[in-house]
Amino acid sequence: MKIRKKIPLIDQHNKYGMWGNKFGGNYVPETLKKPIKDLEILFTKLRNNKRFISERDKYFQNWIGAPTRFINLKNLSKHVNGAQIWAKVVSDANGGAHKIYNATVHCLLAKKAGKKFIVGDTGAGYAGKMLSMAAKKFGLKCKIFMGAKDIKRQQPNVKAMKNNGAEVVPVYTGSQTLVDAVSECMRYWVANCDTTAMCVGSTVGPNIFVKICGWSTSQISKELIEQIKNEFGSVPKKLKLYNCVGGGSSSYGFWSEFLDYNKSQVELIGVEAGGPRKSRRHAAPLTYGSKIGILHGAAQYVNQNHEGQIEETESISAGLDYPGVSPLHCFLKDIKRARYTAASDEDALDAFKLVTKFENLRPSLEPSHAFSIAIKEAKKLNKDTIIVVNSCGDAHKDKKILEAKLGKKYD
């Protein structure tokens, strides 16, 4: 199966909401079928409504700060002495990460649906921080579910959520990370869907949430393709786009406008979290051949044990610490449109040190995974190749982790 040109990938699913007849779907309890259907009807109507799109674009430009920068990392490129390395600095967006696009659209939809409450999940804290910001902006009461382990390691974003008036609910079940936060968030929505909207923080979950998130984050590649054409005159003959992959929202948004290009011209490289080098745990189901399973309402490649139970993950990066992955990425892997690999915790830290040494850029631990692979592969390529890394989050939230691991103070 191939990607159909001129049709957004988020719409290339069958009548059951599945991409490639294998990934995605709506594996939800009966009580959620009506609210999901209502959300599908609302989104389908509004995404083609010129007034709604104009309203969305107004907030994207005047509140989020679109477009974000596209910059040449000249010093890093000179050090590597291979391909040219550029960055799309999505962390310039209001709040410091790409999650603000999805949060804004979900809050706009919630207002249109007449909801007064919105609930969300978060791992690295960015999805929660952005949802709390958008909820405050649009006058919605907000509740965020977050794993207890992630609350400890992402304190700056937890503080920001609370300052924005959100209730942060710690989750103590399972691994106490993102996967458990998503589960608890969905359970809460089952009981409160009449009054409460739900924002899934990535391109995961039942079909409609994958579509809303993908539609929102596609803003990244819409900007990027124009910035590339303005810089180079056209899309280069050898272009490589590197992005970290956890749930997969920033990577889909970064790639969506380039999916129609031949992969010999535009290669898409997703970098998952390989975990600590000495650990057998990881958050890289696409890289390490995980089997298809059901997680959070969707069929996907997911880390499982021999009995089919979801395995716990391990990563220095809370935003990538998830056992599954978007059905969109599962589909892209199956049709070989994107290539997936993994970087270890140590690789990410080394890349962070290198990028911050040579450039005025401080990527969070999530995009540091992507920088790691981009730098390694750039060394083997010539200067005719253009590499772009999505620096989708800033490192402010990782301050304590970086100080503990690198022995250096960070503001």
Image (cartoon, rainbow, N blue to C red):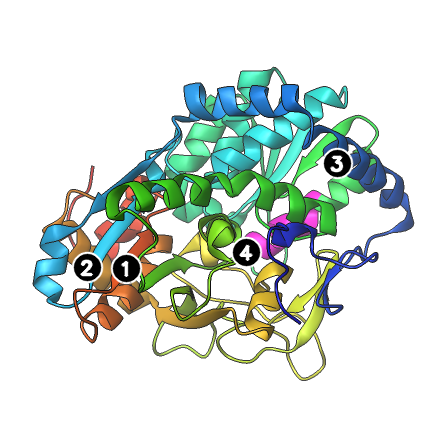
For residue 62, above or below residue 354: above
- Identified by mark 3, the residue type is Thr
The quarter of the picture where residue 303 lies is bottom right
Amino acid type, label 4: Gly
Front label number (2 vs 4): 2
**Front tag of 4 and 3:** 3
Q: Earlier in the sequence, mark 4 or mark 3?
A: 3
C-alpha distance separating marks 1 and 4:
23 Å
- Quadrant location, the C terminus: top left
Q: Secondary structure at mark 2?
A: strand
Label 1 Cα neighbours within 10 Å, binned few <14 / some 14-19 / many ≥20: many
Q: Amino acid at mark 2?
A: Gln
The answer to whether one can see residue 394 in this image is no
- Which residue does the numbered mark 3 point to in the structure image? 44
Please provide the residue range marked out in magenta.
Answer: 176-185
According to the image, label 4 marks what residue?
A: 247
Q: Which residue is mark 2?
A: 84
Real-space Cα separation, disc 2 to disc 4, in angstroms: 28 Å
Q: Residue at x 32, y 34 (%)?
A: 92
Query: Where, quadrant-wise, is the N terminus in this rendering?
Result: bottom right
Q: Residue furthest front?
A: 233
- Crowding near pointer 2: few (<14 within 10 Å), some, many (20+)? many
Residue depicted at x 15% and y 42% = 360
